[in-house]
Image (cartoon, rainbow, N blue to C red):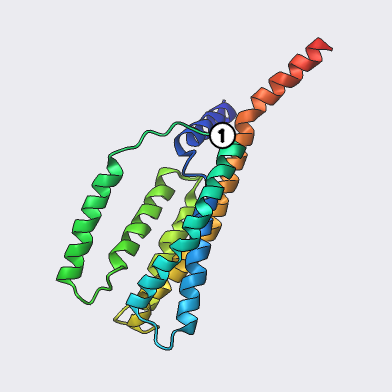
Amino acid sequence: MDQHRLRLDRIRLLSARFHELQGLRVALAGASMALVVGGYLIAAPRPTNNGAMVAMLVSFVPVVAGMPRLNRYYATTFGRQVWSPSRKPWLFLGVYIVVSSSLNTWIPSIPAGTPTMAIVALASLWVAIRDWPWRGYYLGATAAVVIGFTVSAPVGGLLAPNMTLGTMFLLLGTSMVPIGLLDHLLLVKLMKEARAPEAASAASRIGGDG
């Protein structure tokens, strides 16, 4: 009975998170961010938070170029699922803009991208809790943002405050690589389990015909 319930839970997870589990996109974005921002931190004589923001935006270029290939790969390998757009992302975006702009106005010492990193940390925490234990590894992204901010905090940080965004982007991008790969491996595993009854049924039919 427990095995049956576990299987049903996995099927529900696959159905509900099919698009989210296509993690090679996340891994690509994380690798690109880590490489570009890391290169900026090493090459720049005096890295700044604004420079880290520019480097992070530049890291989207290879992601945009590689995304169509990943889309074709997932569509060919795993098929397509009908997706109904929700209004929640737009509501979330509106709330985020209001909150981040307010924080930057009230506390000018906070770097412009810090509220974004806070939202990323909270969103990753929410995914880990929502899909626990299957996707508990999303806690890694939350930890990366917290560690990055802690070691470069304006008060008591080990690094200079001008390294805050660069450090957080670097650690976040690095954490996104294993997170994306684990999502992809989970998708492969769930798809294999979902197709197992079909394979067993086909084998039984062949055996019956023989």
Q: Position of residue 14 (x, y in %)?
A: 51, 35
> In the image, what residue type sits under mark 1?
Gly
Q: Residue furthest bottom?
A: 45
Q: Looking at the picture, does residue 7 appear above or below residue 24? A: above
- Say which quadrant the N terminus sits in: top right
Q: How many marks?
A: 1
With 33 as the anchor, is 202 left or right in this view? right
Q: Nearer the viewer, residue 66 or 13?
A: 66
Callout 1: helix, strand or loop? loop
> Going 53% across and 34% down the picture, which residue do you hit?
10
Taking 35 as reference, is 119 left or right? left
> Where is residue 107 drawn, in percent x and y?
18, 72
Extreme top residue here? 209
Q: Position of residue 8 (x, y in %)?
A: 52, 28
Residue that label 1 marks: 79
Residue furthest out toward the right: 210
Q: Identify the residue shown where x is 34% and y is 63%.
A: 117
